[in-house]
Image (cartoon, rainbow, N blue to C red):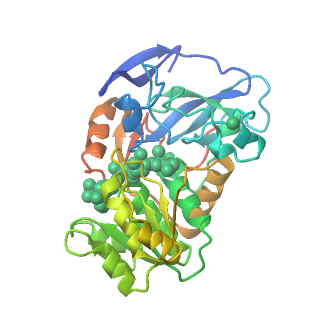
Amino acid sequence: MGNTYKAVEVFEPGALRVVERPIAAPGPGQVRIRVEACGICHTDAAAVTGIYPGLNRPRVPGHEVVGRIDALGDEVSKWAIGQRVGVGFFGGEDGVCEPCRRGDIVNCQNPVIPGVTVDGGYAEAMIAEARGIASIPDELTSAEAAPLLCAGITTYNALRNAGLRGGDLVAVQGIGGLGHLGIQFARHMGLHTVAIGRGREKEKLAKDLGAHVYIDTAADDATAVLQRMGGARAILATAPSGGAMGPLVSGLAARGKLIVVGVPQDPMQLSAFPLVFGGRSIYGSLAGTAIDTEDALAFSVLQNVRPMIETVPLEQAADAYARMMQGKARFRMVLVTGDRADERTPAN
Ligand SMILES: NC(=O)c1ccc[n+]([C@@H]2O[C@H](COP(=O)([O-])OP(=O)(O)OC[C@H]3O[C@@H](n4cnc5c(N)ncnc54)[C@H](OP(=O)(O)O)[C@@H]3O)[C@@H](O)[C@H]2O)c1
Ligand SMILES: [Zn+2]
Ligand SMILES: [Zn+2]
């Protein structure tokens, strides 16, 4: 890598280019990561298209980053050079806003977001806040760990914090990067798992991932199928479609929850009736903290949850991003640098 490193930056809305940048030293409380793998999350579209409020260009996207620490800033304890770590969407809290002062740091009002407020992981190197990084277990390769840093933690936390009990009927809507992990987590958490997709193409994949039942919304009314099964205790809505999310409330059992993790551009429309008559609710859930991520990684090792990935060299980021946006990824595109992303054990 020398004194420069390769990065892929957004230089104008919708356009990615490969550039060579001077290597920078981490500041106090920061580490520099030599990136081995970075997943391409649908949320990267907010950086690439420039719709994220206050986004500055050029900006390097990417918040599913795994690599090895190669430099430590001042005041960094706990972490060591050579250690394999990851950083996701939640890259660090400010520690002073009201949610932070109440201990709810994931809802920090001024967070560090890799790929949005600071440069992210579509690069050979990245600077991260030490308080925002997670340790990567040796059992996972860097490429397979990367999607767990956002798609994984998001679905894992949403499910584990939903007050569900073993055997509860739970549906995962949208079978993409998030959804294909959500199905596996739900199944391995002991939940009666329904996958909701559009078209027959993903039925076998969804069942292979652990879904007990697949609903094809092109052929069936998902709410009617769920109601015939007794109603879902929770529906994890991952599809970036507001139009498809709102009606799902009617598929919930009394007191059931629609957990919104997808962030569609179009508004959701809701009928008040199923909310009021049956005490159903709807709320959002955002990624998770670094320590939550370590839980998600440990659970994935324990239960053999793995993302299905397609790896591509960093230089082909623009093509890989386009493939994700076209819904062609099965199920996560992961950018890799060099040849180390398939290694499990930490290098020294
Ligand atoms: N809450 C959080 O912290 C968080 C974290 C990460 C991502 N996100 C958001 O979550 C969403 C999903 O991200 P992702 O990375 O999983 O995206 P993705 O890999 O592109 O997958 C999205 C999936 O949704 C499916 N879909 C779209 N419209 C649908 C519909 N009407 N009915 C059923 N399925 C539909 C697509 O399937 P087709 O093949 O049928 O098109 C696609 O497989 C994005 O909005 C992203 O910004 C939120
Ligand atoms: Zn993401
Ligand atoms: Zn804060």
| Rendered position, 45 above or below 191 | above
Total numbered labels: 0
In percent of width and height, residue 117 lies at 53, 27
Q: Residue at x 51, y 73 (%)?
A: 256
Q: Residue at x 73, y 37 (%)?
A: 79
282 lies left or right of 29: left
In percent of width and height, residue 338 lies at 43, 34
Determine the image quadrant of residue 108: top right
Determine the image quadrant of residue 100: top right
Q: Quadrant of the C terminus?
A: top right
- Viewer-nearest residue: 20 or 62: 62
Q: Residue at x 38, y 82 (%)?
A: 227
Residue 175, can we see it? no
254 lies left or right of 250: right
In percent of width and height, residue 33 lies at 59, 31
| Rendered position, 235 above or below 45 | below
303 lies left or right of 50: right
In percent of width and height, residue 7 lies at 43, 24
- Viewer-nearest residue: 71 or 63: 63
Residue 190, can we see it? yes
